[in-house]
Each structure stands twice: as C-alpha cells, then as structure tokens.
Image (cartoon, rainbow, N blue to C red):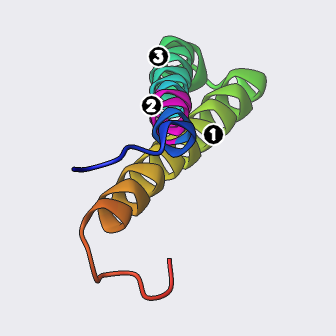
C-alpha cells in the first residue's frame, strides 16, 4: 500500500501555484512595459528625448522580465525532468 506524505504534497502544490502566478505576473508586466514602449515610439521618432528615454527604459525592463519568466520556466522544466540537475 502506498502512503502519501500529505505535508509534502501540499508543499509541492503550493509551490506550483505560487511559481505559476509569479511567471504569469512577470510575463504580464513585460507585455505591459512593451506596450508602454510602443506608445512612446511615435513621440520619440519626432525627436523628444524624454520619450526616447522612456521608450528605451520600458523596452529594456520588458525584455528583462521576459528573460526572467523564460528562466523560471526552464528551471521548472529542469526540476521536473529527472537526472538533469544533480543533487536537487
């Protein structure tokens, strides 16, 4: 008969939900910042330096958030596939 360690099951379930929400939030904020950068694009093309800086900062932050969400997904896949990460 298989016994279930309920504490560990709830820990894994809570970790899965929290990490999923974190990835969704990171990606959603990245989309929002990328949209903000696209809205500032027309003003920056006209030579507005402030709009150009705003567009560049939003675009850089969006790409950083995309990289973080991609890294979290890859790390999760590496955790799921047995034997890829030694000692975990």
**Mark 2 Cα within 10 Å, few/some/many (few <14, many 20+)?**
some
* Mark 1 vs mark 2: in front: 2
Q: Residue at x 57, y 16 (%)?
A: 40
Query: Where's residue 2, x and y in %?
Result: 26, 50
Q: Give the number of the disc on residue 61.
A: 1
Most extreme residue toward the front, as rendered?
1
Alpha carbon distance from label 1 to label 2: 20 Å
**Range drawn in magenta:** 12-20
Q: Secondary structure at mark 3?
A: helix
Q: Residue at x 47, y 51 (%)?
A: 72
Location of mark 2 (residue):
20
Main SS of residues in magenta: helix
- Depth check: 65 or 14 in front? 14
Location of mark 3 (residue):
35
Task: Please identify the quarter of the rendering in which residue 37 is found.
Answer: top right
Residue 15 lies within the magenta run:
yes
Q: Give the number of the disc on residue 51.
A: none
Q: Secondary structure at mark 2?
A: helix
Query: Where's residue 25, x and y in %?
Result: 54, 23
Residue 9 lies within the magenta run:
no
Alpha carbon distance from label 3 to label 1: 12 Å
Alpha carbon distance from label 3 to label 2: 23 Å
Q: 23 above or below 86?
A: above
Query: Where's residue 22, x and y in %?
Result: 55, 31
- Depth check: 88 or 51 in front? 88
Q: Pointers 1 and 2 in contact (CB under 8 A)?
A: no
Q: Could you tell which of marks 3 and 2 lies nearer the N-terminus?
A: 2
């Amino acid at each position: 008969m298989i016994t279930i360690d309920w504490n560990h099951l709830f820990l894994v379930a809570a970790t899965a939900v929290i990490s999923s929400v974190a990835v969704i939030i990171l990606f959603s904020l990245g989309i929002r910042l990328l949209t903000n950068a696209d809205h500032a694009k027309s003003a920056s093309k006209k030579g507005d330096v402030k709009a150009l800086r705003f567009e560049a900062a939003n675009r850089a932050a969006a790409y950083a958030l995309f990289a973080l969400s991609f890294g979290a997904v890859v790390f999760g896949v590496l955790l799921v596939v047995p034997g890829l990460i030694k000692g975990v």
